[in-house]
Amino acid sequence: MSKTTFVISDESVNSYGYIVKTDGIDTPAFERNPVMLYMHERKTVVGRWENIRKEGKRLLADAVFDESTELGRTVKQQVENGFLRSASIGVDIVEEKEINGVRTITKSVLFEVSIVDIPANQNALKLYRKGNRQRLALEVPEKVEDLRGAIISLLGLDEGVTDEDIITEIQNLLNTPDEATTEVEEAIKAGFVEGKDRCNFVTMARLNRNVFRTFISGEKNKRRKAVKTAVDGAITDGRINCPSRGVYERIGETMGLETLSELLCTIRRSPRLSEMLPNGDRSKWTLTDYRKYRPEDLKNNPKLYAALVEAESMAGTDGMGGKHSLEYLRKHNPEYLREHPEEYEKMLANI
């Protein structure tokens, strides 16, 4: 796995007006579980940090991305392409002093490092509070004396509303799809995102819409290239002609490569003119091709006929009495599926 080195903190003044002393950052506890988060969201682990070290006033770490997940691969690509360049730390403040008129955190404990889009300063420092330690924040929320009343006011409900009505209203708001959710659902429907990854991609879309849209754009380009390759192969193979290229490319881009492949498998390959000549290359011909175009060859060559019959009987099996899977036949013997549409339909129905 490739690694990218980040400066995750230095001693410059951050947007909160603080300096964090590098030699005062305690890292051993974090190094026992150095997970990499995306945008400080605990649900979005996209990798881990390695080789955490101090070099002068800088705290450095190597990013190792988890490419087993779509989000991990996407963030890695964004980093490599230069669209995401910042890492942000979370620390518990242990001790702080005012030095030269600047509030300075002299001792702290590192507990989280994230990949972020917009850092609080040039090294993306983000500060937290834990337990009774001080919290660094842009603003302090007002103390809520009446939680129920505050919730009713925020929801715009009448003062006499029941608890059940409050819960119902909150559930309705939670179940109402926002723009990010809608885009993810459309991506799932189009086949660019798997349903099992829905939550991760909704989080991605809500935190950074551009990252999500860049990922989808990349998937569309991949599909477009794969569809073009499949259509080119079908033209070369004689299954479709050049004038119909646009139709099949639109089918593939709209309905997906798998649907296009299934459609192309149902189309018989037309022999080339060179194959029809007396000494033409008929190595790709099936028993059906010979029966249709050169039945006299079967009559005059019993060995050829026997070989073709044997090949057809074995085409759908693994040679040991078991049948090949639909995926295997699509990849290695699509001719068998074209020659046996009834069996092809049965295999599709059993998926």
Image: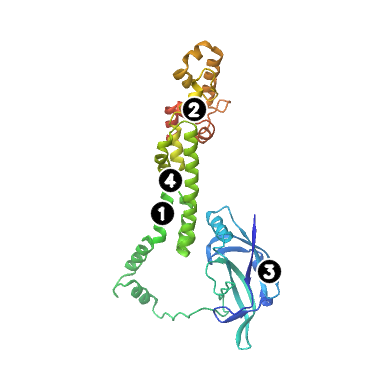
Q: Earlier in the sequence, mark 1 or mark 3?
A: 3
- Pointer 1: what residue? 185
- Pointer 2: what residue? 336
Residue 351 at least partly seen: no
Name the spot of residue 57 as percent of width and height, x first: 68, 76
Instruction: Tell us which disc is closer to us: 4 or 1.
Output: 4
Report which quarter residue 2 is drawn in.
bottom right
Question: Residue shown at 43%/28% (left/top)?
Answer: 341
How many other residues sit within 10 Å of disc 2, few (<14), some (14-19) or many (≥20)?
A: many
Instruction: Tell us which disc is closer to us: 2 or 1.
Output: 2
Q: Secondary structure at mark 2?
A: helix
Residue 28 bears which disc, if any? Answer: 3
Label 3 and label 2: CA atoms lie apart by 61 Å
Q: Earlier in the sequence, mark 2 or mark 1?
A: 1
Instruction: Tell us which disc is closer to us: 1 or 3.
Output: 1
Looking at this view, is 346 or 58 the one in front?
58
- Pointer 4: what residue? 253
How many other residues sit within 10 Å of disc 3, few (<14), some (14-19) or many (≥20)?
A: few
